[in-house]
Image: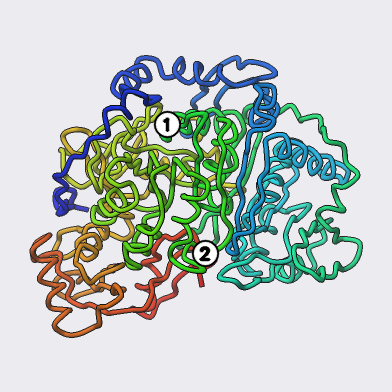
Amino acid sequence: MSQEKLLNLLKVQKCIYPPEDFVKNANVKDYEAEYKRFLENPEKFWEEVANQLFWYKKWDKVLEWNYPYAKWFVGGKTNITVNALDKNIEKGLKNKVAFFWEDEFGNEKVVTYGELYRLVNKIANALRRAGVKKGDRVVIYMPLVVEQIAAMLACARIGAIHSVVYAGFSAPALRHRIQDAEAKLVITADVTIRRGRAIPLKQIVDEAIRDLEYVEKVVVLRRLQPKVDLIGEKEVDFYDFIKDESNYCEPEIMDAEDPLFILYTSGSTGKPKGVLHTTGGYMVGTYYSMKTVFDLKDSDIYWCTADPGWITGHSYIAYGPLLAGATQVIAEGAPNYPDPGRWWRIIEKYGVTIFYTAPTAIRMFMAAGEEWPNKYDLSSLRLLGSVGEPINPEAWLWYYRVIGKERCPIVDTWWQTETGSVMITTIDSLPMKPGKAGKPVPGVIADVVDKNGNPVEPNKGGFLVIKYPWPTMMRTIYKDKERYEKYWNTIPNCYFAGDIATKDEDGYIMVLGRADDVINVSGHRIGTMEVESALVSHPAVAEAAVIGKPHPVKGETIKAFIVLRKDHKPSEKLIEDIKYHVRMELGALAVPSEIEFVDKLPKTRSGKIMRRVLKAKELGMDPGDLSTLEE
């Protein structure tokens, strides 16, 4: 690939500064000093963070690095739930709210740290009584309810490895994950509620585990009346399962490198891969990023809109916030049901101060119109976050202006299931550049390089890599060592994330899209994010996705799929107008040769656009693994 011709067409000029009083009170007031402290002695840096947490036995060595395999806090013994629960209760947080939970109908449940502690311990004791031991795998296939998070923590309490599967996957997708993990026990619910409908989960589990002898028990949270029937001795009601158990379960003493969880992430092709994370490093890294990236204070009401079926819900609902003693909001169901005011109503009701969501949700609310958020008092907000895919400048500026009222810094975070925690962001005391994720979080060495691993010039396109191990890094792909090593063997001496990016003269990184999605037009490689960003900046366009189509002369041409904002109708004139707009924004090379108007785009359940599905359909190809597709 000709590296010089990987274009960076999207020019981000704007610089927005956080309020002075925010910087004055920030947990990281001086990013450069904190990053310098890390670079001077990375192991000492992480040791100081780890010392803020409880260990049964301190480590013999902070890092053992045998490329591409790392061990963190070698010889250290801990239990992540002791830090997330026991130690917080000892600090006086017993009656502090851990979770405000709400469903689509406004029904709510308030759970304190003391109540969560008792629930987790009861589930942990019940799992032990059912024969679940350290190292056994438990699959959790549940809606976003407090019991789901408690079940994860209960597994961690006794050293069982949890594998959470999003409650929306089909029976074959669930079965694959249960088979690969060889799960001993499955925890599920009768239904999940979405858009006012009860979507059955238990019957999906029944189908998924048919003839799987190693699944010894299915625990069912029965939510509806009359209660769904349980079949045979294998199935048990969730609350019957735990009712006679003690409020205290002796935690398993875990080695820092003992597995904590397996999370299956969709591969572009082939089977989903089981990303394996371990105990000590993941605990230290998620705790640190919670305090620094999100500037978390004791008084904050924090809301991450993800689901624990994804890594964001693991790191920034189930573990990071609880390790840091946060009060959280969690909400089951669709963001815009019963109407597009739902999320803004929740922010007003609970006084949410930190709000972390996905660009795809932001664009959906942009399309619905400003009148919805403007109906509610959002003055409690002090920090906004973005996660899941690059956020285009247009959506960033809308989020900043309409939701944050131009006074809330935005942390645009780049990270992955494989990295475990946020790797790149604009730490909230730094100036922000809309569309640019920002700089490496202290503790991370990230760069933009060519295929030989050499840094590229400022503002030139290249490959986004991590050059040094970090505590929350995955340790392997479960049962597939070669697949793990490929991350480290594609570009010399680097972890290659699979994304292309640019880095400006100030060190700010902008992610341009997946390397697989780059479009080659007449020998010039163009990132999908740039073209999509230019399209979405047109006043008629709500969402856009672009693909490359083979062309005998140009190599590829660009085809755009566009969802229009309400009050706009498809027309030939609008197509020409949009093309002209892209030409003015990016230049002639980036103008789509075809534009197709669609009602919706294919997305994963976490909101990422699946461009390969569009491309496969367009070219009559096999789309590969579709287990994460929303519909």
Amino acid beneath label 1: Asp
**Amino acid under label 2?**
Ala
Q: Looking at the image, which residue is at 77% across and 30% down?
A: 251
Q: Nearer the viewer, residue 45 or 373?
A: 373
Q: Is residue 527 left or right of residue 207?
A: left
The residue labelled by disc 2 is: 334
Closest to the observer: 12 or 95?
A: 95
Quick check: 39 left or right of 340? left
Q: Earlier in the sequence, mark 1 or mark 2?
A: 1
Residue 262, given in percent of the width and then of the height, sits at 61, 47
**Residue 506, above or below 73:** below
> What residue is at 38 percent from the left and 44 percent from the top?
379
Helix, strand or loop for disc 1: loop
Q: Which numbered disc covers residue 295?
A: 1
At label 1, counting other C-alpha atoms closer than 10 Å, the crowd grade (few under 14, some 14-19, many 20 or more) is some
Q: Image check: 340 left or right of 140?
A: left
Q: Position of residue 270 (x, y in %)?
A: 51, 63
